[in-house]
């Protein structure tokens, strides 16, 4: 299991079922942890979207929305339990580039794995 720390309390962990994207928000007096599991299909879908000039991607369960452009991304997480608030993490250029690269790397690995299984 590979664990990548992207800074901003955002991590990607590789698991057999895909990845786990985790963000721990310390912006308020209360610490909120957001955990989003993504299948290889979801990672590949996100990778395709991230290559566009304008990004607007919503996870199937609507827990995560990723929007932005080539220079920055905003990851908006929806709480799964009351109070069902949304919290956003903005990734500026260096962090956005690294996030894109990590997602692209995994999507490429999934594609290679799928081809080798044929």
Image (cartoon, helix red, strand yellow):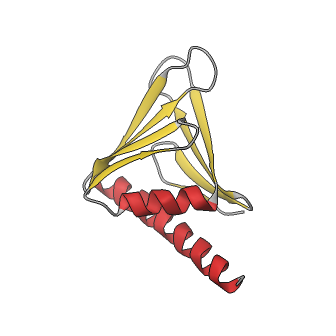
Image-based side of 70 in relation to 41, left or right? left
User: In the image, residue 90 lies at what x, y percent?
Assistant: 35, 40
45, 81: nearer the viewer: 45
User: In the image, residue 60 lies at what x, y percent?
Assistant: 56, 43
Pick out the residue farthest to the top. Answer: 83
Residue shown at the point (34%, 64%) measured from the top left: 51
Among the 4 quarters of the image, the one containing residue 27:
top left
Residue shown at the point (60%, 32%) measured from the top left: 33
Among the 4 quarters of the image, the one containing residue 118:
bottom right
54, 5: nearer the viewer: 54
Residue shown at the point (72%, 58%) measured from the top left: 17
**Can residue 98 be seen from the camera position used here?**
no
Q: How many numbered marks have been drawn onto this rendered protein structure?
A: 0
Pick out the residue farthest to the front. Answer: 118
65, 97: nearer the viewer: 65
Which quadrant of the rendered structure holds the N terminus?
A: bottom right
**Can residue 9 be seen from the camera position used here?**
yes
Residue 72, above or below 85: below
User: In the image, residue 81 lies at what x, y percent?
Assistant: 64, 21
Residue shown at the point (33%, 51%) measured from the top left: 55
User: In the image, residue 5 lies at what x, y percent?
Assistant: 54, 54
Residue 57, above or below 24: below
Among the 4 quarters of the image, the one containing residue 3:
bottom right
């Amino acid at each position: 299991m590979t664990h990548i720390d992207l800074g901003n309390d955002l991590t990607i962990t590789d698991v057999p079922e895909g990845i786990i994207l985790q963000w721990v928000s310390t912006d308020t007096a209360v610490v909120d942890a957001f955990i989003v599991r993504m299948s290889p299909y979801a990672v590949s879908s996100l990778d395709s979207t991230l290559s566009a000039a304008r990004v607007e991607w919503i996870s199937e369960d609507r827990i995560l929305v990723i929007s932005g452009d080539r220079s920055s991304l905003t990851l908006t997480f929806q709480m799964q339990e009351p109070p069902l608030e949304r919290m956003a993490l903005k990734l500026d250029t260096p962090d956005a580039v690294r996030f894109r690269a990590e997602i692209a790397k995994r999507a490429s690995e999934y594609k290679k794995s799928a081809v080798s299984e044929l």
